[in-house]
Image (cartoon, rainbow, N blue to C red):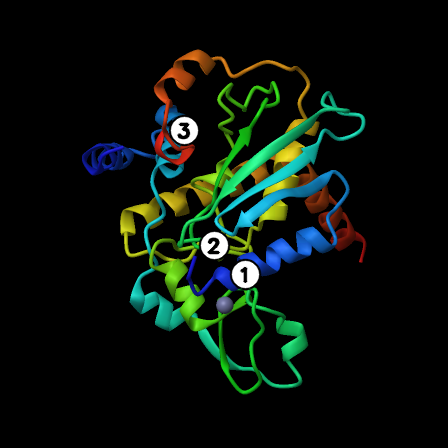
Amino acid sequence: MATRYAKRLQKELMELQVSPPTGIRVEEANDLSRWVIGIDGTTGSLYQGEKFSLQFRFNDGYPLEAPEVIFIGKPPVHPHIYGNGHICLSILYDHWSPALTVLSICLSILSMLSSCTEKVRPVDDSVYVSRAVGKSPKDTR
Amino acid sequence: MSDQNVHNIVNGIRFIGEDDHEELDIERIKFIMKHTPTPPISEYQFQELTEEVIITKRNKERIGDCTICVNEFPLDTEAIKLPCKHYYHFDCITQWLKMHSNCPNCRTQLPTNNSEYDAYSRILAEHEKKEREGINEDEDRSMRRQTKNSGMFS
Ligand SMILES: [Zn+2]
Ligand SMILES: [Zn+2]
Protein backbone atom coordinates (compact mmCIF):
# COMPACT_ATOMS: atom_id res chain seq x y z
CA MET A 1 0.00 0.00 0.00
CA ALA A 2 1.96 2.94 -1.24
CA THR A 3 -0.05 6.00 -0.43
CA ARG A 4 0.81 9.29 1.18
CA TYR A 5 -1.32 8.21 4.11
CA ALA A 6 0.27 4.78 4.70
CA LYS A 7 2.22 6.40 7.50
CA ARG A 8 -0.98 7.23 9.31
CA LEU A 9 -2.07 3.56 9.21
CA GLN A 10 1.32 2.46 10.53
CA LYS A 11 1.02 4.94 13.38
CA GLU A 12 -2.49 3.81 14.24
CA LEU A 13 -1.43 0.17 14.17
CA MET A 14 1.57 0.76 16.37
CA GLU A 15 -0.45 2.67 18.96
CA LEU A 16 -3.06 -0.10 19.06
CA GLN A 17 -0.37 -2.77 19.45
CA VAL A 18 1.68 -0.92 22.03
CA SER A 19 -1.12 0.40 24.24
CA PRO A 20 -4.45 -1.21 23.38
CA PRO A 21 -7.44 -0.06 25.47
CA THR A 22 -9.13 -2.74 27.58
CA GLY A 23 -11.24 -5.07 25.48
CA ILE A 24 -9.65 -4.16 22.13
CA ARG A 25 -6.69 -5.99 20.54
CA VAL A 26 -5.04 -6.40 17.17
CA GLU A 27 -5.45 -10.04 16.14
CA GLU A 28 -3.99 -9.81 12.67
CA ALA A 29 -2.28 -7.13 10.60
CA ASN A 30 0.28 -8.94 8.47
CA ASP A 31 -0.89 -6.88 5.57
CA LEU A 32 -1.38 -3.18 6.27
CA SER A 33 -4.51 -3.13 4.12
CA ARG A 34 -6.35 -5.80 6.13
CA TRP A 35 -6.53 -5.92 9.90
CA VAL A 36 -8.52 -8.09 12.27
CA ILE A 37 -9.33 -6.45 15.59
CA GLY A 38 -10.76 -8.40 18.50
CA ILE A 39 -13.30 -6.69 20.73
CA ASP A 40 -14.84 -7.91 24.00
CA GLY A 41 -18.44 -7.26 25.00
CA THR A 42 -18.39 -4.62 27.74
CA THR A 43 -18.97 -5.64 31.35
CA GLY A 44 -22.57 -4.96 32.31
CA SER A 45 -23.82 -5.06 28.70
CA LEU A 46 -25.84 -7.83 27.05
CA TYR A 47 -22.61 -8.95 25.38
CA GLN A 48 -20.50 -9.35 28.52
CA GLY A 49 -18.21 -12.37 28.18
CA GLU A 50 -18.60 -12.55 24.35
CA LYS A 51 -15.68 -11.99 21.99
CA PHE A 52 -15.98 -10.72 18.45
CA SER A 53 -13.67 -10.08 15.51
CA LEU A 54 -13.86 -7.06 13.23
CA GLN A 55 -12.22 -7.05 9.81
CA PHE A 56 -10.95 -3.70 8.55
CA ARG A 57 -10.05 -3.25 4.89
CA PHE A 58 -8.29 -0.07 3.85
CA ASN A 59 -7.93 1.11 0.30
CA ASP A 60 -5.67 3.86 -0.99
CA GLY A 61 -8.35 6.40 -0.16
CA TYR A 62 -8.05 5.98 3.61
CA PRO A 63 -8.48 8.19 5.64
CA LEU A 64 -10.32 10.36 3.11
CA GLU A 65 -12.55 7.33 2.57
CA ALA A 66 -13.90 5.10 5.33
CA PRO A 67 -12.41 1.64 5.72
CA GLU A 68 -14.71 -1.31 5.05
CA VAL A 69 -15.58 -2.76 8.44
CA ILE A 70 -17.45 -6.03 9.01
CA PHE A 71 -17.71 -8.66 11.72
CA ILE A 72 -16.09 -11.95 10.76
CA GLY A 73 -16.77 -15.24 12.52
CA LYS A 74 -19.94 -15.08 14.59
CA PRO A 75 -21.35 -11.52 14.52
CA PRO A 76 -23.16 -10.18 17.61
CA VAL A 77 -26.94 -10.51 17.55
CA HIS A 78 -27.94 -6.83 17.44
CA PRO A 79 -30.72 -4.81 15.73
CA HIS A 80 -28.11 -2.97 13.62
CA ILE A 81 -25.82 -5.87 12.75
CA TYR A 82 -26.77 -8.24 9.96
CA GLY A 83 -26.23 -11.99 10.07
CA ASN A 84 -23.45 -11.66 7.47
CA GLY A 85 -21.46 -9.30 9.69
CA HIS A 86 -22.38 -6.05 7.94
CA ILE A 87 -22.88 -3.15 10.34
CA CYS A 88 -25.43 -0.35 10.13
CA LEU A 89 -23.41 2.55 11.48
CA SER A 90 -23.47 5.89 9.66
CA ILE A 91 -19.85 6.82 10.45
CA LEU A 92 -18.76 3.87 8.30
CA TYR A 93 -20.61 5.30 5.30
CA ASP A 94 -22.16 8.76 4.76
CA HIS A 95 -20.98 10.20 8.05
CA TRP A 96 -17.36 9.18 7.80
CA SER A 97 -14.80 11.82 8.73
CA PRO A 98 -11.02 11.50 8.27
CA ALA A 99 -10.63 12.63 11.88
CA LEU A 100 -12.06 9.23 12.91
CA THR A 101 -9.63 6.37 13.51
CA VAL A 102 -9.65 2.58 13.76
CA LEU A 103 -9.80 3.01 17.53
CA SER A 104 -12.70 5.46 17.43
CA ILE A 105 -14.59 3.07 15.12
CA CYS A 106 -14.02 0.19 17.56
CA LEU A 107 -15.23 2.38 20.44
CA SER A 108 -18.35 3.40 18.49
CA ILE A 109 -19.15 -0.23 17.74
CA LEU A 110 -18.62 -1.17 21.40
CA SER A 111 -20.91 1.62 22.55
CA MET A 112 -23.49 0.54 19.98
CA LEU A 113 -23.35 -2.93 21.55
CA SER A 114 -23.45 -1.57 25.10
CA SER A 115 -26.57 0.50 24.51
CA CYS A 116 -28.49 -2.48 23.11
CA THR A 117 -31.50 -3.55 25.16
CA GLU A 118 -32.64 -6.56 23.14
CA LYS A 119 -30.61 -9.11 21.21
CA VAL A 120 -32.42 -9.32 17.89
CA ARG A 121 -31.31 -9.20 14.26
CA PRO A 122 -32.45 -6.32 12.00
CA VAL A 123 -36.03 -6.81 10.76
CA ASP A 124 -34.87 -7.08 7.13
CA ASP A 125 -31.99 -9.42 7.94
CA SER A 126 -32.79 -12.30 5.59
CA VAL A 127 -33.66 -10.01 2.67
CA TYR A 128 -30.52 -7.95 3.15
CA VAL A 129 -28.19 -10.92 3.64
CA SER A 130 -29.36 -12.63 0.44
CA ARG A 131 -29.09 -9.38 -1.51
CA ALA A 132 -25.60 -8.65 -0.14
CA VAL A 133 -23.95 -11.96 -1.06
CA GLY A 134 -20.41 -11.28 -2.26
CA LYS A 135 -20.80 -7.51 -1.85
CA SER A 136 -19.07 -4.97 0.32
CA PRO A 137 -21.40 -3.22 2.80
CA LYS A 138 -20.29 0.00 1.13
CA ASP A 139 -22.05 -1.08 -2.07
CA THR A 140 -25.36 -2.29 -0.66
CA ARG A 141 -26.84 0.95 0.57
CA MET B 1 -31.44 8.83 -5.23
CA SER B 2 -31.18 10.29 -8.73
CA ASP B 3 -30.51 13.97 -9.31
CA GLN B 4 -33.89 14.29 -10.96
CA ASN B 5 -35.61 12.99 -7.84
CA VAL B 6 -33.74 15.41 -5.66
CA HIS B 7 -34.64 18.17 -8.05
CA ASN B 8 -38.35 17.32 -7.93
CA ILE B 9 -38.35 17.33 -4.18
CA VAL B 10 -36.47 20.59 -4.11
CA ASN B 11 -39.15 22.23 -6.19
CA GLY B 12 -41.78 20.91 -3.81
CA ILE B 13 -40.08 22.64 -0.93
CA ARG B 14 -40.75 26.09 -2.33
CA PHE B 15 -44.18 25.84 -0.66
CA ILE B 16 -42.64 25.87 2.76
CA GLY B 17 -44.31 28.22 5.20
CA GLU B 18 -47.84 26.85 4.85
CA ASP B 19 -48.13 25.54 8.38
CA ASP B 20 -49.84 22.26 7.56
CA HIS B 21 -47.08 21.25 5.23
CA GLU B 22 -44.13 22.45 7.19
CA GLU B 23 -43.66 19.35 9.32
CA LEU B 24 -43.83 17.13 6.25
CA ASP B 25 -41.32 19.22 4.36
CA ILE B 26 -38.83 19.11 7.20
CA GLU B 27 -39.05 15.33 7.18
CA ARG B 28 -38.50 15.39 3.46
CA ILE B 29 -35.48 17.65 3.76
CA LYS B 30 -34.02 15.45 6.47
CA PHE B 31 -34.47 12.47 4.17
CA ILE B 32 -32.79 14.19 1.25
CA MET B 33 -29.89 15.41 3.35
CA LYS B 34 -29.39 11.92 4.70
CA HIS B 35 -29.26 10.40 1.24
CA THR B 36 -27.39 13.06 -0.69
CA PRO B 37 -23.61 12.93 -0.62
CA THR B 38 -22.25 16.27 0.60
CA PRO B 39 -21.26 18.41 -2.37
CA PRO B 40 -17.74 19.88 -2.35
CA ILE B 41 -17.05 23.34 -0.99
CA SER B 42 -17.03 26.11 -3.55
CA GLU B 43 -13.53 27.19 -4.51
CA TYR B 44 -14.44 30.82 -4.02
CA GLN B 45 -15.69 30.14 -0.49
CA PHE B 46 -12.57 28.16 0.32
CA GLN B 47 -10.49 31.22 -0.55
CA GLU B 48 -12.80 33.50 1.39
CA LEU B 49 -13.29 31.46 4.53
CA THR B 50 -9.96 29.86 5.20
CA GLU B 51 -6.87 31.50 6.57
CA GLU B 52 -3.21 30.60 6.12
CA VAL B 53 -1.48 30.55 9.47
CA ILE B 54 2.30 30.35 9.83
CA ILE B 55 3.35 27.82 12.43
CA THR B 56 5.56 29.39 15.08
CA LYS B 57 7.00 28.22 18.39
CA ARG B 58 4.20 30.15 20.09
CA ASN B 59 1.19 28.61 18.32
CA LYS B 60 2.53 25.14 17.45
CA GLU B 61 1.46 23.37 20.61
CA ARG B 62 -2.00 24.91 20.66
CA ILE B 63 -2.59 23.96 17.02
CA GLY B 64 -1.50 20.34 17.49
CA ASP B 65 -1.24 17.89 14.58
CA CYS B 66 -3.25 17.60 11.38
CA THR B 67 -5.99 15.06 12.15
CA ILE B 68 -6.17 13.88 8.53
CA CYS B 69 -2.58 12.65 8.13
CA VAL B 70 -1.75 12.72 11.88
CA ASN B 71 1.51 14.51 11.10
CA GLU B 72 2.71 17.67 12.78
CA PHE B 73 2.93 21.09 11.18
CA PRO B 74 6.64 21.88 10.83
CA LEU B 75 7.76 25.29 12.10
CA ASP B 76 7.61 28.12 9.56
CA THR B 77 5.20 26.26 7.28
CA GLU B 78 1.62 27.26 6.63
CA ALA B 79 -1.44 25.55 8.06
CA ILE B 80 -4.95 26.11 6.75
CA LYS B 81 -7.37 27.39 9.39
CA LEU B 82 -11.08 26.75 8.89
CA PRO B 83 -13.64 29.20 10.33
CA CYS B 84 -14.29 26.72 13.18
CA LYS B 85 -10.61 27.13 14.20
CA HIS B 86 -9.44 23.66 13.15
CA TYR B 87 -6.13 23.42 11.30
CA TYR B 88 -5.00 21.14 8.44
CA HIS B 89 -2.25 20.83 5.87
CA PHE B 90 -3.31 22.47 2.63
CA ASP B 91 -3.04 19.17 0.69
CA CYS B 92 -4.95 17.22 3.33
CA ILE B 93 -7.93 19.55 3.66
CA THR B 94 -8.24 20.32 -0.04
CA GLN B 95 -8.36 16.58 -0.81
CA TRP B 96 -11.22 16.21 1.69
CA LEU B 97 -13.07 19.32 0.51
CA LYS B 98 -13.02 18.08 -3.09
CA MET B 99 -15.65 15.56 -2.04
CA HIS B 100 -17.17 17.11 1.08
CA SER B 101 -17.92 20.46 2.63
CA ASN B 102 -17.57 20.00 6.35
CA CYS B 103 -14.78 20.15 8.88
CA PRO B 104 -13.45 16.63 9.63
CA ASN B 105 -13.07 17.49 13.31
CA CYS B 106 -16.34 19.15 14.23
CA ARG B 107 -18.46 18.60 11.08
CA THR B 108 -19.24 22.31 10.79
CA GLN B 109 -20.85 22.72 7.40
CA LEU B 110 -19.18 25.12 4.96
CA PRO B 111 -20.95 26.66 1.95
CA THR B 112 -20.98 24.18 -0.95
CA ASN B 113 -20.95 24.64 -4.70
CA ASN B 114 -24.61 23.57 -4.67
CA SER B 115 -26.94 26.35 -3.59
CA GLU B 116 -29.94 24.03 -3.24
CA TYR B 117 -28.02 21.89 -0.78
CA ASP B 118 -27.06 24.99 1.18
CA ALA B 119 -30.69 26.11 1.23
CA TYR B 120 -31.70 22.80 2.86
CA SER B 121 -28.94 23.10 5.40
CA ARG B 122 -30.23 26.53 6.34
CA ILE B 123 -33.87 25.39 6.57
CA LEU B 124 -32.86 22.46 8.77
CA ALA B 125 -30.68 24.62 10.99
CA GLU B 126 -33.48 27.15 11.42
CA HIS B 127 -35.96 24.39 12.19
CA GLU B 128 -33.66 22.94 14.82
CA LYS B 129 -33.13 26.37 16.32
CA LYS B 130 -36.88 26.93 16.48
CA GLU B 131 -37.35 23.57 18.18
CA ARG B 132 -34.73 24.45 20.76
CA GLU B 133 -36.32 27.84 21.38
CA GLY B 134 -39.70 26.16 21.80
CA ILE B 135 -38.29 24.21 24.70
CA ASN B 136 -36.88 27.35 26.30
CA GLU B 137 -39.94 29.51 25.76
CA ASP B 138 -41.26 29.19 29.32
CA GLU B 139 -37.89 30.08 30.74
CA ASP B 140 -37.72 33.13 28.50
CA ARG B 141 -41.12 34.33 29.61
CA SER B 142 -40.26 34.17 33.30
CA MET B 143 -36.98 35.94 32.54
CA ARG B 144 -38.87 38.75 30.81
CA ARG B 145 -41.23 39.13 33.73
CA GLN B 146 -38.30 39.44 36.10
CA THR B 147 -36.71 42.10 33.96
CA LYS B 148 -39.93 44.07 33.89
CA ASN B 149 -40.31 43.87 37.66
CA SER B 150 -36.81 44.99 38.33
CA GLY B 151 -37.42 47.91 35.99
CA MET B 152 -40.49 48.92 37.98
CA PHE B 153 -38.71 49.05 41.30
CA SER B 154 -35.48 50.61 40.29
ZN1 LIG C 1 -2.20 16.64 7.13
ZN1 LIG D 1 -13.89 22.28 12.80
Q: Is residue B5 visible?
A: yes
Quarter of the figure with the C terminus of chain A: top left
Q: Residue at x 55, y 29 (%)?
A: A72
Give the letter of the chain under mark 1.
A
Q: Is residue B137 visible?
A: no
In the rendered image, which residue does mark 3 sit on?
Answer: B27
Q: Position of residue B47 (x, y in %)?
A: 36, 72
Give the letter of the chain under mark 3.
B
In the rendered image, which residue does mark 2 sit on?
Answer: A63
Taking depth in this image into account, of B61 and A1 the one nearest to the observer is: A1
Q: Position of residue A13 (x, y in %)?
A: 61, 54
Q: Nearer the viewer, mark 1 or mark 2?
A: 1
Please, what is the three-letter code of the amino acid marked with disc 2? Pro
Residue A8: mark: 1
Dots 3 and 2: beta carbons under 8 Å?
A: no
Give the side of residue A39 with respect to residue A94, left or right: right
Please, what is the three-letter code of the amino acid marked with disc 1? Arg
